[in-house]
Image: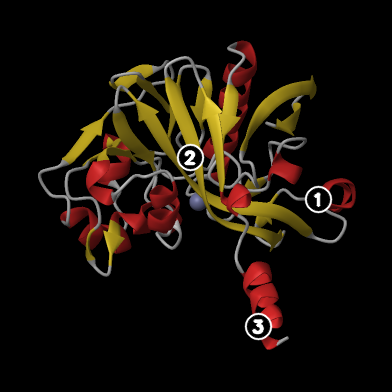
Protein backbone atom coordinates (compact mmCIF):
# COMPACT_ATOMS: atom_id res chain seq x y z
CA UNK A 1 0.00 0.00 0.00
CA UNK A 2 2.79 2.35 0.99
CA UNK A 3 4.49 1.67 -2.36
CA UNK A 4 1.32 2.50 -4.25
CA UNK A 5 0.95 5.74 -2.32
CA UNK A 6 4.55 6.74 -2.95
CA UNK A 7 4.18 5.96 -6.67
CA UNK A 8 1.03 8.08 -6.73
CA UNK A 9 2.81 10.96 -4.98
CA UNK A 10 5.69 10.71 -7.47
CA UNK A 11 3.26 10.77 -10.37
CA UNK A 12 1.49 13.82 -9.04
CA UNK A 13 4.71 15.64 -8.20
CA UNK A 14 6.45 14.91 -11.50
CA UNK A 15 5.48 17.35 -14.22
CA UNK A 16 4.04 15.53 -17.22
CA UNK A 17 6.60 15.64 -20.02
CA UNK A 18 4.07 16.75 -22.59
CA UNK A 19 3.48 19.86 -20.48
CA UNK A 20 7.17 20.77 -20.66
CA UNK A 21 7.87 20.34 -24.32
CA UNK A 22 6.16 21.01 -27.61
CA UNK A 23 7.60 20.61 -31.09
CA UNK A 24 6.77 22.97 -33.95
CA UNK A 25 8.08 22.19 -37.43
CA UNK A 26 8.89 24.95 -39.89
CA UNK A 27 10.08 24.52 -43.50
CA UNK A 28 13.74 24.15 -42.51
CA UNK A 29 13.79 23.74 -38.76
CA UNK A 30 12.30 22.13 -35.70
CA UNK A 31 11.51 24.51 -32.88
CA UNK A 32 11.15 22.86 -29.48
CA UNK A 33 9.58 24.43 -26.41
CA UNK A 34 11.70 24.00 -23.28
CA UNK A 35 9.28 25.01 -20.54
CA UNK A 36 10.45 25.69 -17.03
CA UNK A 37 7.49 27.07 -15.15
CA UNK A 38 3.77 27.22 -15.84
CA UNK A 39 2.00 29.21 -13.18
CA UNK A 40 -0.84 31.52 -12.31
CA UNK A 41 0.46 35.03 -11.74
CA UNK A 42 -1.00 37.97 -9.87
CA UNK A 43 -1.87 40.94 -12.06
CA UNK A 44 -0.15 43.33 -9.63
CA UNK A 45 2.66 44.68 -11.78
CA UNK A 46 0.67 45.80 -14.78
CA UNK A 47 0.52 49.40 -15.97
CA UNK A 48 -2.66 50.77 -17.57
CA UNK A 49 -4.64 47.84 -16.20
CA UNK A 50 -7.92 49.70 -15.58
CA UNK A 51 -10.79 48.26 -13.48
CA UNK A 52 -12.74 47.81 -16.76
CA UNK A 53 -9.93 45.81 -18.37
CA UNK A 54 -9.51 43.82 -15.14
CA UNK A 55 -13.23 42.98 -14.99
CA UNK A 56 -13.14 41.71 -18.56
CA UNK A 57 -9.80 39.86 -18.70
CA UNK A 58 -8.81 38.94 -15.15
CA UNK A 59 -11.71 39.25 -12.72
CA UNK A 60 -9.80 37.29 -10.04
CA UNK A 61 -6.71 39.48 -10.62
CA UNK A 62 -4.62 36.61 -12.01
CA UNK A 63 -3.47 35.35 -15.39
CA UNK A 64 -1.69 32.19 -16.59
CA UNK A 65 2.01 32.62 -17.32
CA UNK A 66 5.09 30.58 -18.08
CA UNK A 67 8.86 30.75 -18.29
CA UNK A 68 10.31 29.22 -21.44
CA UNK A 69 13.35 28.84 -23.61
CA UNK A 70 13.33 27.37 -27.13
CA UNK A 71 15.64 25.04 -29.01
CA UNK A 72 15.98 25.44 -32.78
CA UNK A 73 17.27 22.43 -34.68
CA UNK A 74 18.46 23.78 -38.01
CA UNK A 75 21.27 23.00 -40.48
CA UNK A 76 22.36 20.13 -38.22
CA UNK A 77 22.91 22.53 -35.32
CA UNK A 78 21.32 22.96 -31.90
CA UNK A 79 20.58 26.61 -31.24
CA UNK A 80 19.02 27.94 -28.05
CA UNK A 81 16.89 31.04 -27.86
CA UNK A 82 17.37 32.20 -24.25
CA UNK A 83 18.19 29.76 -21.47
CA UNK A 84 15.50 30.41 -18.85
CA UNK A 85 16.54 30.23 -15.21
CA UNK A 86 18.38 27.01 -15.91
CA UNK A 87 16.28 24.92 -13.54
CA UNK A 88 14.70 22.54 -16.06
CA UNK A 89 16.83 23.47 -19.07
CA UNK A 90 19.40 20.69 -18.94
CA UNK A 91 16.81 18.00 -18.19
CA UNK A 92 14.61 19.28 -21.01
CA UNK A 93 17.52 19.28 -23.46
CA UNK A 94 18.43 15.75 -22.42
CA UNK A 95 14.89 14.66 -23.32
CA UNK A 96 15.75 15.55 -26.91
CA UNK A 97 19.19 13.94 -26.73
CA UNK A 98 20.97 17.29 -26.62
CA UNK A 99 23.98 17.66 -24.32
CA UNK A 100 25.33 21.10 -23.35
CA UNK A 101 28.39 20.50 -25.58
CA UNK A 102 26.05 19.97 -28.57
CA UNK A 103 24.71 23.54 -28.40
CA UNK A 104 26.58 25.70 -30.91
CA UNK A 105 24.78 29.04 -30.65
CA UNK A 106 22.63 30.84 -28.09
CA UNK A 107 20.47 33.77 -29.18
CA UNK A 108 19.54 36.04 -26.28
CA UNK A 109 16.37 38.16 -26.44
CA UNK A 110 17.38 40.31 -23.47
CA UNK A 111 19.36 40.27 -20.24
CA UNK A 112 16.80 39.54 -17.55
CA UNK A 113 17.68 36.69 -15.19
CA UNK A 114 14.83 34.44 -16.34
CA UNK A 115 16.42 34.49 -19.81
CA UNK A 116 20.15 34.19 -19.16
CA UNK A 117 20.69 32.36 -15.84
CA UNK A 118 20.84 29.01 -17.66
CA UNK A 119 24.08 30.14 -19.32
CA UNK A 120 25.74 28.96 -16.11
CA UNK A 121 25.56 25.80 -14.07
CA UNK A 122 26.89 25.94 -10.50
CA UNK A 123 28.68 29.14 -11.43
CA UNK A 124 30.49 27.59 -14.40
CA UNK A 125 30.00 28.06 -18.11
CA UNK A 126 27.21 25.62 -19.02
CA UNK A 127 27.73 25.49 -22.81
CA UNK A 128 31.44 24.98 -23.57
CA UNK A 129 31.27 25.42 -27.35
CA UNK A 130 28.42 27.91 -27.78
CA UNK A 131 28.69 31.42 -29.15
CA UNK A 132 26.29 33.86 -27.50
CA UNK A 133 24.47 36.40 -29.68
CA UNK A 134 22.81 39.52 -28.36
CA UNK A 135 21.96 42.97 -29.64
CA UNK A 136 24.61 45.65 -29.31
CA UNK A 137 22.14 47.87 -27.49
CA UNK A 138 21.43 45.14 -24.90
CA UNK A 139 25.12 44.45 -24.50
CA UNK A 140 25.82 48.16 -23.91
CA UNK A 141 23.20 48.09 -21.15
CA UNK A 142 24.28 44.84 -19.47
CA UNK A 143 22.84 44.72 -15.93
CA UNK A 144 25.21 44.02 -13.03
CA UNK A 145 23.80 40.52 -12.39
CA UNK A 146 24.51 39.47 -15.99
CA UNK A 147 28.11 40.71 -16.20
CA UNK A 148 29.75 37.82 -14.33
CA UNK A 149 27.82 35.23 -16.32
CA UNK A 150 28.59 36.82 -19.69
CA UNK A 151 32.26 36.96 -18.63
CA UNK A 152 32.21 33.14 -18.68
CA UNK A 153 31.71 33.46 -22.46
CA UNK A 154 34.30 36.15 -23.07
CA UNK A 155 35.65 35.84 -26.62
CA UNK A 156 32.49 33.98 -27.66
CA UNK A 157 30.01 36.87 -27.51
CA UNK A 158 28.78 38.28 -30.79
CA UNK A 159 26.82 41.51 -30.83
CA UNK A 160 24.70 42.72 -33.72
CA UNK A 161 22.43 45.59 -34.60
CA UNK A 162 18.82 44.47 -35.21
CA UNK A 163 16.55 46.73 -37.23
CA UNK A 164 12.80 47.23 -37.74
CA UNK A 165 13.17 45.03 -40.87
CA UNK A 166 14.38 41.46 -40.48
CA UNK A 167 18.16 41.06 -40.59
CA UNK A 168 19.88 37.69 -40.72
CA UNK A 169 21.77 37.09 -37.48
CA UNK A 170 22.83 33.50 -38.13
CA UNK A 171 22.12 31.28 -41.13
CA UNK A 172 18.34 30.72 -41.31
CA UNK A 173 17.43 33.02 -38.41
CA UNK A 174 16.52 36.71 -38.65
CA UNK A 175 16.45 39.30 -35.89
CA UNK A 176 14.05 42.18 -35.41
CA UNK A 177 14.41 45.03 -32.92
CA UNK A 178 11.63 45.20 -30.32
CA UNK A 179 13.17 47.66 -27.87
CA UNK A 180 11.38 48.92 -24.78
CA UNK A 181 10.96 45.97 -22.44
CA UNK A 182 14.74 46.35 -22.13
CA UNK A 183 16.97 48.76 -24.07
CA UNK A 184 17.94 46.12 -26.66
CA UNK A 185 15.12 43.56 -26.51
CA UNK A 186 15.25 41.52 -29.73
CA UNK A 187 12.94 38.94 -31.34
CA UNK A 188 13.97 36.16 -33.72
CA UNK A 189 12.32 34.68 -36.80
CA UNK A 190 12.91 31.25 -38.27
CA UNK A 191 10.86 30.53 -41.42
CA UNK A 192 7.22 31.23 -40.46
CA UNK A 193 7.79 31.32 -36.69
CA UNK A 194 8.62 34.35 -34.59
CA UNK A 195 10.08 33.77 -31.12
CA UNK A 196 9.10 37.04 -29.52
CA UNK A 197 10.80 36.86 -26.10
CA UNK A 198 9.04 39.18 -23.67
CA UNK A 199 6.86 41.05 -26.13
CA UNK A 200 4.07 40.01 -23.74
CA UNK A 201 3.96 38.84 -20.12
CA UNK A 202 0.21 38.52 -19.55
CA UNK A 203 -1.29 37.08 -22.74
CA UNK A 204 -4.86 36.99 -21.39
CA UNK A 205 -4.68 40.75 -20.81
CA UNK A 206 -2.16 42.09 -23.33
CA UNK A 207 -3.63 40.38 -26.40
CA UNK A 208 -7.01 42.14 -26.17
CA UNK A 209 -5.30 45.20 -24.62
CA UNK A 210 -1.73 45.49 -25.95
CA UNK A 211 -1.37 48.96 -24.43
CA UNK A 212 -1.23 47.38 -20.96
CA UNK A 213 2.45 47.37 -19.92
CA UNK A 214 4.35 45.83 -17.00
CA UNK A 215 6.51 47.42 -14.33
CA UNK A 216 9.54 45.36 -15.49
CA UNK A 217 9.55 47.29 -18.77
CA UNK A 218 12.57 49.61 -18.86
CA UNK A 219 10.52 51.99 -21.01
CA UNK A 220 6.81 51.01 -20.92
CA UNK A 221 5.80 53.47 -23.67
CA UNK A 222 8.48 52.17 -26.02
CA UNK A 223 7.53 48.59 -25.10
CA UNK A 224 3.91 49.33 -26.08
CA UNK A 225 4.99 50.83 -29.42
CA UNK A 226 7.14 47.78 -30.15
CA UNK A 227 4.32 45.42 -29.15
CA UNK A 228 1.86 47.12 -31.52
CA UNK A 229 4.42 47.20 -34.36
CA UNK A 230 5.42 43.55 -33.95
CA UNK A 231 1.79 42.40 -33.65
CA UNK A 232 1.02 44.14 -36.96
CA UNK A 233 4.13 42.57 -38.49
CA UNK A 234 3.00 39.11 -37.37
CA UNK A 235 -0.48 39.58 -38.85
CA UNK A 236 0.83 41.03 -42.11
CA UNK A 237 3.37 38.24 -42.59
CA UNK A 238 1.11 35.44 -41.27
CA UNK A 239 3.68 34.28 -38.73
CA UNK A 240 3.10 31.83 -35.92
CA UNK A 241 4.45 33.11 -32.61
CA UNK A 242 6.27 31.62 -29.64
CA UNK A 243 6.91 33.48 -26.39
CA UNK A 244 8.94 33.13 -23.24
CA UNK A 245 5.94 33.91 -21.02
CA UNK A 246 3.14 32.45 -23.12
CA UNK A 247 1.62 29.56 -21.13
CA UNK A 248 1.83 26.01 -22.51
CA UNK A 249 2.09 25.16 -25.39
CA UNK A 250 3.63 28.65 -25.72
CA UNK A 251 3.29 28.62 -29.51
CA UNK A 252 0.24 29.68 -31.52
CA UNK A 253 -1.49 31.99 -33.93
CA UNK A 254 -2.39 35.65 -33.42
CA UNK A 255 -5.44 37.10 -35.13
CA UNK A 256 -6.71 40.65 -35.17
CA UNK A 257 -10.08 41.19 -33.54
CA UNK A 258 -10.48 44.76 -34.70
CA UNK A 259 -8.94 48.06 -33.62
CA UNK A 260 -5.93 47.30 -31.46
CA UNK A 261 -7.35 44.09 -30.10
CA UNK A 262 -5.77 40.70 -30.79
CA UNK A 263 -6.50 37.08 -30.00
CA UNK A 264 -4.06 34.21 -29.42
CA UNK A 265 -4.98 30.65 -30.35
CA UNK A 266 -2.59 27.99 -28.99
CA UNK A 267 -1.09 25.52 -31.47
CA UNK A 268 -2.31 21.91 -31.33
ZN1 LIG B 1 11.10 37.47 -18.91
Q: Earlier in the sequence, mark 1 or mark 3?
A: 3
At 62% from the left edge and 27% from the top edge, which residue is drawn?
228
Q: CA distance from mark 3 to mark 2?
A: 53 Å
The residue under label 1 is 50
Picture layout, residue 102 above or below residue 39: above
Q: Is residue 23 left or right of residue 93?
A: right
Residue 129 is marked as none
Q: Is residue 61 left or right of residue 26?
A: right
The answer to whether the residues at label 1 and label 3 have Cβ atoms under 8 Å apart is: no
The answer to whether the residues at label 1 and label 2 have Cβ atoms under 8 Å apart is: no
Image position, residue 93 (x, y; %): 40, 48
Q: Earlier in the sequence, mark 1 or mark 2?
A: 1
One can see residue 243 in this view: yes
At 53% from the left edge and 55% from the top edge, which residue is drawn?
216
Picture layout, residue 63 above or below residue 224: below
Q: Is mark 3 within 8 Å of ligand 1?
A: no
Q: Extreme bottom residue here? A: 2
Pick whichever, 154 or 2, lies toward us: 2
Q: CA distance from mark 1 to mark 3?
A: 51 Å
Q: Residues within 10 Å of mark 3 (few under 14, many from 20)?
A: few
Answer with the quarter of the image where residue 168 lies. top left
Residue 3 is marked as 3
Picture layout, residue 62 above or below residue 133: below
The residue under label 2 is 180
Q: Residues within 10 Å of mark 1 (few under 14, many from 20)?
A: few
Amino acid sequence: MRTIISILITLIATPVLSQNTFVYKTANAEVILLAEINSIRKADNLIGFTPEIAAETAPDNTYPGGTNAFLIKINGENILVDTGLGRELFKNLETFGVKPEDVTKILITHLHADHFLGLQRDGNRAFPYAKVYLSLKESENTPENAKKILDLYSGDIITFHPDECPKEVISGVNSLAAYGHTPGHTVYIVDDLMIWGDLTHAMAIQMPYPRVAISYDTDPQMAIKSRLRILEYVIKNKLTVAGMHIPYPSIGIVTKEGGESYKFTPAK
